[in-house]
Image (cartoon, grey):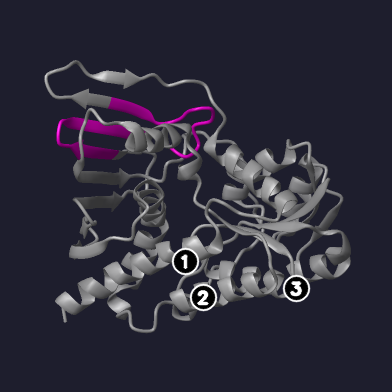
């Protein structure tokens, strides 16, 4: 039995992560750290967590000898310092994406993880979607469609939440990190701070998924960034591709990847993050033939499969998907997109 602790019990933790780790039979949640006392006590009662702390450092002092890993689900501004603290103390870590706000922070975390030989997994759950796994196999084996010539990733989405989603909303006072104290790449112009926050949050999933599918880090050919929408053109070894994105603060969700081949296309539509037991819909179209729909089947939620992976990794002491070293490359590509844009607009 693996003992884990949760750091953070807000919306994302309640909706995505706590339920999935709680129902696993080969791990147990032995402690929770949450700044909001009423919220923390409510969650401990709901999930039968015996030990509650308002300070994650106190949690570790009291449970270090019995703790196998932590799940860190906090605001982006706090992920780096909390992950660093546990890695320094030789505790395995799962944290939500992005792993940090800057490449220098990512490198520091990777170095700590490797030095202490720890399992450090970052939460990019889309690669655990069953439809994505099917697409990965199609890309390897599909000879009828020919070679890839181009792809288009449309990430014109809202927050992906479901309406009337039930969760415990605390009335405890919780101070957000002052904008002046937030951390950004040292070279980034302050006029791009808000856009960088949005793009990093919404498109870290995108670049992670593209890397998973194409096994390649692309060259950046063109970038246009604005609050209205964003366009990035990539050059891979044998084809071009684009990311078209815009984030809305509503419930709509429209994420599609269409891959064009010499003899047709494959289109995959990704479900909102909270759609349980749903995976992506895949359409395959060969020229001069009927469209073939890969039927949606009932399957484990990608969030649940991601939680399973982390616990399995704690047992095997190995990590195959979304390691910190691999996730660092996602952050690097996002930063390079903004570097490219700044150079073109000085």
Image coordinates for residue 313, horizontal then vertical, percent: 67, 50
- Dot 3 alpha-carbon crowd within 10 angstroms: few under 14, some 14 to 19, many 20 or more: few
| Boundaries of the magenta span | 257-283
Q: Reply above or below: 189 against 300.
A: below
In the rendered structure, find residue 89 and report the number of the disc placed on it: 3
Task: Choose between 85 and 42: the one closer to the eye.
Answer: 85
Regarding mark 3 in the picture, which secondary structure is present there? loop
Residue 258 is one of the magenta-drawn residues: yes
What residue is drawn where x is 24% and y is 39%?
259
Query: Marks 1 and 3, how far apart in space?
Result: 21 Å
The residue that disc 2 covers is: 107
**Label 1 close to label 3 by CB (< 8 Å):** no
Residue 167 in percent (x, y) is at 61, 41
Instruction: Report the disc number at residue 328.
Output: 1
* Numbered badge on residue 58: none
Q: Image quarter for residue 66? A: bottom right
Which residue appears at 58% of the width and 72% of the height? 109
* Vertical placement of residue 107 versus 169, above or below: below
């Amino acid at each position: 039995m693996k003992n884990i602790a949760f750091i953070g019990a807000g919306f994302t933790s309640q909706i995505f992560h706590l339920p999935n780790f709680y129902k696993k039979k080969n791990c147990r949640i032995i402690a929770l750290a949450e700044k909001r006392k009423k919220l923390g006590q409510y969650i401990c009662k709901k999930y039968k967590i015996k030990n509650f702390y308002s300070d994650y450092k106190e949690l570790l002092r009291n449970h270090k000898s019995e703790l196998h890993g932590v799940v860190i689900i906090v605001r982006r501004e706090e992920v780096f310092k909390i992950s660093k603290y546990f890695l320094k103390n030789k505790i395995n870590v799962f944290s939500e994406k992005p792993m940090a706000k800057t490449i220098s922070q990512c490198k520091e975390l990777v170095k700590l993880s490797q030095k202490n030989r720890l399992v450090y997994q970052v939460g990019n759950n889309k690669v655990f979607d069953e439809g994505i796994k099917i697409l990965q196999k199609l890309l390897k084996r599909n000879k009828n469609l020919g070679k890839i010539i181009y792809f288009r990733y449309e990430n014109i989405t809202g927050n992906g939440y479901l309406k009337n989603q039930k969760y415990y909303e605390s009335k405890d006072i919780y101070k957000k990190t002052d904008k002046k104290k937030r951390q950004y790449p040292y070279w980034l112009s302050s006029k791009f701070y808000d856009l960088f926050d949005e793009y990093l949050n919404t498109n870290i999933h995108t670049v992670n998924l593209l890397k998973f599918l194409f096994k390649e880090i692309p060259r950046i050919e063109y970038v246009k960034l604005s609050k209205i929408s964003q366009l990035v053109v990539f050059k891979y070894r044998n084809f071009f591709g684009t990311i078209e994105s815009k984030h809305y603060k509503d419930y709509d969700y429209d994420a599609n990847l269409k891959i064009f081949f010499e003899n047709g296309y494959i289109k995959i539509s990704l479900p909102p993050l909270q759609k349980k037991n749903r995976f992506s819909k895949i359409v395959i179209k060969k020229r001069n033939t009927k469209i073939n729909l890969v039927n949606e089947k009932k399957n484990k939620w990608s969030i649940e499969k991601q939680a399973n992976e982390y616990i399995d990794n704690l047992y095997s002491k190995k990590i195959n998907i979304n390691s910190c070293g691999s996730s660092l490359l996602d952050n690097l590509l996002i930063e390079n997109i903004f570097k490219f844009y700044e150079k073109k607009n000085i």
